[in-house]
Image (spheres, rainbow, N blue to C red):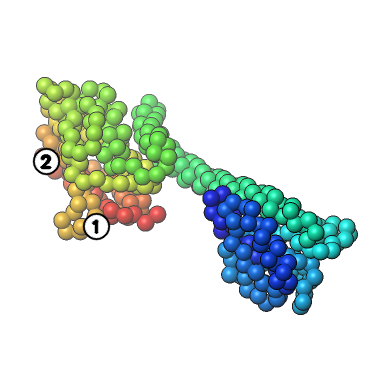
């Protein structure tokens, strides 16, 4: 790295052909805490090799050298390691030469007759290099975050536009269209809120299910679990439980699959409330997941409706069904099976534990 923490000894590259002058320079630099590690070279090829090897924090260079001059050394350093501070330490350095050296990128110059200034100059140059490197890291991080935000906003807007278009059904009353659209947009907003709370890092499948089912639980169908692990949801401890969740495996989810599963569960819950088990008094929904016995690197999620009305496969596949299939197959790289059974609707989802983004 070009900049070290204050507690780490800096590595200085000293370009000096005089052994006596090199010894004096090293003696003055011992006042720095902690004392720097000094790598001394005197020839052009050795200087270039040391720069190429890296691990240097600052360069000290004489102006007059056996096989090339200090200005050439400065040009080489600016080309091979432009981030390194460069300080001339010379016996003679005229005003015009000093000005030209600054124009070409030198950090400072110290006369050998006044080496007492050297430790302060080196410490100041190292501190400025650390600050510059930190600013550069912050700027790069900002650029990454801006690009990531732009990408997420574009994806979100594309999904919103798709929902607006696909929710509309010819001949559908305007009130139904608005209600369905707001339902789906609300599910998306809730999923984004959960991801925001986790700083767009990993979240748990149980949290995704809880957040998605929360509107139905608030409506009196059930209560929200307060901890991970197997949970049953009902109107109360003494009342019949309408929604059950069996979290038999901890499933960490990155943002993309978390959002996709949130939309899937919202569609399943909406359908259950309108046409399935939750539309029928006494009907129940059981949601469970565990590691798949046949494919250990996959998670099997089961949505099972019990004691609801008899269901039949619809003649035409609606947008909700299409959204579920596309979310599972394309976003989650898995498979989904929808069973319209006389005893109740059943949805089985198989997704890999690790989803390639």
Of residue 4 and residue 253, the one placed in the foreground of this image is: 4
Give the alpha-carbon distance from disc 1 to disc 2, as whole Å. 32 Å
Q: Is residue 20 visible to us here?
A: yes
**Local crowd size for mark 2, using a 10 Å CA cut-off: few (<14), some (14–19), many (≥20):** few
Q: Where does the C terminus fall, quadrant-wise?
A: bottom left
Of residue 154 and residue 70, the one placed in the foreground of this image is: 70
**Local crowd size for mark 1, using a 10 Å CA cut-off: few (<14), some (14–19), many (≥20):** few
| Residue 350 against residue 221 in the figure, above or below | below
Q: Quadrant of residue 27?
A: bottom right
Left or right of 120, for residue 159: left
| Residue 183 against residue 322 in the figure, above or below | above
Q: Position of residue 255 (x, y in %)?
A: 39, 45
Q: Where does the N terminus fall, quadrant-wise?
A: bottom right
| Residue 324 against residue 298 in the figure, above or below | above
Q: Position of residue 140 (x, y in %)?
A: 58, 50
Determine which residue is flagged by label 1. Answer: 297
Q: Position of residue 297 (x, y in %)?
A: 24, 57
Of residue 192 and residue 163, the one placed in the foreground of this image is: 192
Identify the residue shown where x is 64% and y is 53%. Answer: 31
Q: Secondary structure at mark 1?
A: loop
Identify the residue shown where x is 22% and y is 22%. Answer: 220
1 or 2: tag closer to the N-terminus: 1
Q: How many marks?
A: 2
Identify the residue shown where x is 73% and y is 67%. Answer: 21
Q: Nearer the viewer, mark 1 or mark 2?
A: 1
Q: Secondary structure at mark 2?
A: loop
Left or right of 234, for residue 210: right
Determine which residue is flagged by label 2. Answer: 342
Identify the residue shown where x is 27% and y is 46%. Answer: 251
Q: Quadrant of residue 272?
A: top left
Q: Position of residue 224 (x, y in %)?
A: 24, 29
């Amino acid at each position: 790295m070009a900049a070290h923490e204050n507690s780490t000894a800096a590595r200085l590259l000293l370009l000096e052909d005089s052994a006596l002058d090199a010894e004096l320079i090293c003696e003055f630099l011992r006042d720095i805490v902690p004392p720097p590690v000094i790598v001394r070279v005197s020839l052009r090829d050795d200087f270039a090799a040391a720069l190429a090897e890296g691990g240097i924090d600052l360069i000290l260079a004489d102006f007059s050298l056996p096989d090339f001059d200090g200005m050439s050394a400065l040009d080489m350093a600016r080309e091979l390691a432009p981030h390194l501070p460069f300080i001339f330490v010379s016996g003679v350095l005229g005003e015009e030469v000093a000005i030209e050296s600054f124009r070409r990128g030198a950090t400072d110059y110290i006369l050998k007759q006044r080496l007492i200034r050297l430790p302060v100059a080196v410490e100041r140059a190292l501190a400025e290099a650390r600050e510059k490197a930190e600013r550069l890291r912050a700027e790069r991080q900002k650029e990454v975050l801006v690009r990531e935000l732009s990408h997420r906003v574009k994806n979100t807007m594309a999904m919103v536009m798709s929902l607006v278009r696909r929710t509309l059904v010819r001949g559908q009353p305007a009130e139904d269209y608005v209600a369905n659209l707001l339902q789906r947009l609300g599910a998306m907003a809730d999923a984004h809120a959960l991801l925001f709370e986790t700083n767009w890092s990993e979240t748990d499948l149980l949290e995704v299910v809880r957040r998605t089912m929360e509107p139905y639980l608030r409506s009196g169908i059930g209560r929200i679990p307060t901890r991970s692990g197997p949970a049953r949801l009902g109107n109360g401890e003494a009342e019949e439980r309408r929604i059950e969740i069996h979290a038999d495996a901890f499933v960490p989810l990155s943002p993309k699959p978390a959002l996709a599963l949130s939309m899937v569960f919202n569609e399943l819950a909406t359908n259950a409330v309108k046409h399935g088990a939750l539309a029928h008094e006494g009907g129940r929904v059981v949601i469970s997941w565990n590691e798949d016995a046949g494919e250990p690197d996959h998670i099997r999620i089961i949505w099972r409706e019990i004691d609801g009305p008899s269901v039949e496969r619809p003649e035409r596949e609606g947008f909700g069904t299409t959204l579920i299939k596309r979310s599972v197959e394309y976003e989650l790289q898995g498979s989904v099976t929808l069973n319209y059974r006389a005893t109740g609707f059943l949805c089985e989802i198989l997704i890999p534990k690790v989803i390639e983004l």
